[in-house]
Image (spheres, grey):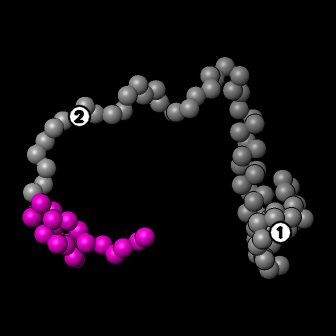
Amino acid sequence: MKITRQEVEHVATLAKLNLTEEELSTMTGQLDTILSYVAKLDELETGDVAPTTHAFTINNAFREDEIVESLPRKEALANAPLENGEAFVVPRII
């Protein structure tokens, strides 16, 4: 067993979670299953694998900027629930 019920209770207390007895049992089983799967990664030989930040090497994933004509204001505001002829009208937040 990778995690005990007491450890789950401790983490639940730290997270300020009030778990029932049934939830504690379920959570203990689920977390134990997850930790068992993660432990399988320890079985892999990774000594010759270089650390990476991405699965694929990508030099630049961005496209070139292209200047294009924008949507006409009237068309952009056509489906707005509320507009004033120049912009969308939204509730004041500040």
Q: Amino acid at mark 2?
A: Asp
Report the residue marked by disc 2: 65
Rendered-image quadrant of the N terminus: bottom right
What is the crowding at mark 1: few (fewer than 14 residues within 10 Å), some, or many (at least 20)?
few
What is the crowding at mark 2: few (fewer than 14 residues within 10 Å), some, or many (at least 20)?
few
Q: Are marks 2 and 1 in contact (CB under 8 Å)?
A: no
Closer to the camera: disc 2 or disc 1?
Answer: 2
Element on which disc 1 rests:
helix
Residue placed furthest toward the top = 48
Element on which disc 2 rests:
loop
Mark toward the start of the polypeptide (2 vs 1): 1
33 is higher (above) or lower (below) than 90: above
Q: Amino acid at mark 1?
A: Thr
> What is the x, y in percent for residue 84?
17, 72
Report the residue marked by disc 1: 13
Q: Nearer the viewer, residue 83 or 59?
A: 83
Rendered-image quadrant of the C terminus: bottom left
90 is higher (above) or lower (below) than 67: below
> What is the x, y in percent for residue 59?
41, 25
Residue 72, image quadrant: bottom left
Give the residue displayed 62% in from the left and 22% down from the top.
50
What segment carries the magenta color? 73-94
Residue 8 visible somewhere in the drawing: no
> What is the x, y in percent for residue 85?
13, 69
Magenta-drawn stretch contains 47:
no
Q: How many marks?
A: 2
84 is higher (above) or lower (below) than 37: below
Left or right: residue 12 versus residue 77 is right
Give the residue displayed 71% in from the left and 54% down from the top.
34
